[in-house]
Amino acid sequence: MFLNNNIKVFSGTGNPELANSVCDYLEIPVGGAKIEKFPDGEKFIKLEDDVRGRDCFVIQSTCEPVDEYLMELLIFIDCLKRASARRITAVVPYFGYARQDRKDEGRVPITAKLVANLITVAGADRVISIDLHAQQLQGFFDIPVDHLTGELILSKYFRDKKIDKLTVISPDVGNMKMAARFAGHLGGELAIVHKKRVSGSEVEAEEVIGNVEGRNIVMCDDIIATAGTVCSAAKLVKKRGAKKIYVGATHGVFAGPALERLSGAGIDEIVVTDTIPLKEVCKKLSNVKVLSVAPMLGEAIKRIHRNESVSSLFNNA
């Protein structure tokens, strides 16, 4: 075994499959906890394992239903705190509300900061998350944050495919740095799509800057939500003469019209990780490939428990 009895890893109901895989990697059982919902909708959590003086981790993706899973995470943290856990780490593979990270118009909240405050006040001592929508979200917390990335997992998958005549595309200007890193990992050319946002769920790709004619495309992003950006970009590069189109993203939210859009966008393969449960999506979209972040999360948990470096996981990034 990697670890001893001083560590406990618990799972919320947001992504139990991932939590099980993480515990398999660590060669420990998932911590015992009873999670119930009362008839009026309230959640109740009771720990079935002794956590006094132990290093505790609770894995919970705050995906849809976001508010329910977030509240469950807060209750879980409070439960561990009141049971005298020595240290509590909130492991949030997908951090809901991450995109509400600034005031871009008057009279709107900065909900990502609010969620950070809630997790801190609930009693978490540190947070682990994967590909927060913006780097500055780490500064929203007044506790340590270990910010992991699915970039190396995705780039390794595409590198192993040995795609020839490769062009890596950023589907918008904001994702240019990530696309440049992917191009470095994969050894391909770099291009960018200029887009215009029509509404919160609809965008129009207007022009491609770079060479895509006769090229195979890898399009990278941190999140696929309504899929408006990637589908619009995919259709545009296809018109410009691109051959195969691959899309890679850490978080597959697939909200609203996403599945319908993706099924008609001419994308050959959509590669995402299991930060969000995707069984139902895979049943509806045959071209979805899911990669696991469990070994990465498990290694981070092991290193945190042993007070070892987590950043060294990405020294080759």
Image: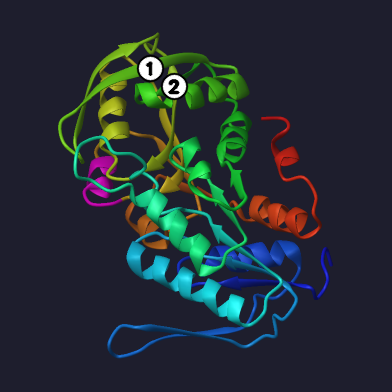
| Residue 149 can be seen, yes or no | yes
- Quarter of the figure with residue 270: top left
Q: Position of residue 79 (x, y in %)?
A: 55, 79
Q: Disc 1, disc 2: CB below 8 Å? A: yes
User: What secondary structure is found at the residue carrying circle 1?
Assistant: strand
Report which residue position mark 1 lands on: 192
The segment highlighted magenta reads 255-263
Q: Please tell me which residue lies in front, 63 or 232.
A: 63
SS majority, magenta? helix
Residue picked out by circle 2? 176
Q: Is residue 104 above or below residue 52?
A: above
Q: Is residue 22 above or below residue 103?
A: below
Q: Residue at x 38, y 25 (%)?
A: 174
* 317 with respect to 127 (left or right): right
Q: Residue furthest bottom?
A: 39
Residue ID at (25%, 29%): 232
- Residue 262 on the magenta segment: yes
Q: Secondary structure at mark 2?
A: helix
Q: Label 2: few (<14), some or many (≥20) within 10 Å?
A: some
Amino acid type for the residue under numbered disc 2: Met
